Image (cartoon, helix red, strand yellow):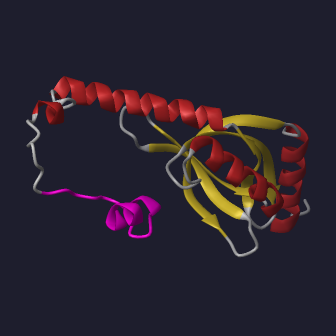
Amino acid sequence: MKALSLTELNRLVGRIIKEAFSETYWLVAETSDVRENATGHCYLEFVERAVQTGNVVAKTRAYIWANTFRLLKPYFEQSTKRIFTSGIKVMVRVGIDFHELYGYGLTVYDIDPTYTLGDLQQKRQAIVRQLEDDGVLTMNKELKFPELPQRIAVISSASAAGYEDFSEH
């Protein structure tokens, strides 16, 4: 019986995976550990959490190559008004890969920002419902506004145009 080297075995596994999963698939997952390197590639993990506990029940590494990431990142951020970072639920089109050295991973080819927008809207509605249930949603409206305010708070970035306008005018 001839023994295989680890490289030979991993190449065999890679060929089998490539034949069995030659298509791309739409995947729903949460982003985790998102990192962009100096060459413009994005390395990340996709995780799935249990609904009841929030514990991670599945995880895999993924990558978005620079030529794709240059297009997907601004498209996603412009559509969702949100930075592409860890902790976002996304729907992405992926291909399944197996590399002799790095093992199993997913290559991202496309992203559907409308899925993330829907998830954000659901979270917002849940927060509003919780505030209503707690009776705190309209508490500020119940406060009497003084005829002449004595203090004003501005919560802003020091470099924001609105802050500069407020300070100057």
Q: Position of residue 12 (x, y in %)?
A: 88, 54
Q: Which residues are magenta?
A: 151-169
Q: Where is residue 24, by image quadrant?
A: top right
Q: Position of residue 133 (x, y in %)?
A: 20, 23
Does the stretch in magenta take in 162?
A: yes
Residue at point 35%, 28% (across, down)? 126
Does the stretch in magenta take in 67?
A: no
Q: Is residue 18 visible?
A: yes
| As drawn, 133 above or below 81 | above
Residue at point 28%, 59% (across, down)? 154
Residue at point 56%, 34% (across, down)? 117
Residue at point 40%, 62% (across, down)? 165
Q: In this view of the protein, which residue sits in the foreground, 145 or 94?
A: 145
Q: Is 155 placed left or right of 22 in the picture?
A: left
Q: In this view of the protein, which residue sits in the foreground, 43 or 3?
A: 43
Q: Where is residue 2, by image quadrant?
A: bottom right
Quarter of the image where the N terminus is located: bottom right
Q: Position of residue 40 (x, y in %)?
A: 74, 68
Q: Position of residue 80 (x, y in %)?
A: 58, 42
Q: In this view of the protein, which residue sits in the foreground, 74 or 39?
A: 74
| As drawn, 129 above or below 151 | above
